[in-house]
Amino acid sequence: MMLVCEWRNFSTDAETYTLELFEEMIGDEFEAMMFEDDQDIPSYIWTVNYVVIVKRNTRMYNDISFTKIPRNPVCE
């Protein structure tokens, strides 16, 4: 497991994810990313307000999807 506090571009068969593209897609500012076992696509990406789970989808080509989870939910 490796936690990185600087953005690293990563690619699937369909897209190359840059910092600008990711922040536009998620609507929040990047903070850190975690890579597992020499993978070139992160497993988790932290933004100011979210933890983003990166899910791999492999059918006919290599692709991913993002699931946003609020970092600090407010319970009332």
Image (tube, rainbow, N blue to C red):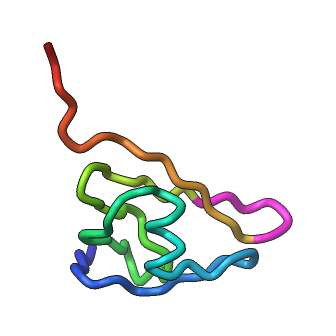
Residue at 36 percent across and 74 percent down: it is: 35
Q: Please report the bounds of the magenta region as a residue range.
A: 56-61
Q: Looking at the picture, tell me which residue is in the foreground, 26 or 36.
A: 26
**Image position of 75 (left or right of 9):** left
Identity of the residue furthest to the left in this view: 76
The image quadrant of residue 38 is bottom left
Q: Is residue 60 magenta?
A: yes
Give x and y (percent) for residue 1: 27, 73
Give x and y (percent) for residue 48: 24, 57
Residue at 23 percent across and 44 percent down: it is: 71
Q: Is residue 53 above or below residue 4?
A: above
Residue at 18 percent across and 39 percent down: it is: 72
Identity of the residue furthest to the right in this view: 60
The image quadrant of residue 29 is bottom left
Give x and y (percent) for residue 69: 36, 41
Give x and y (percent) for residue 74: 17, 26
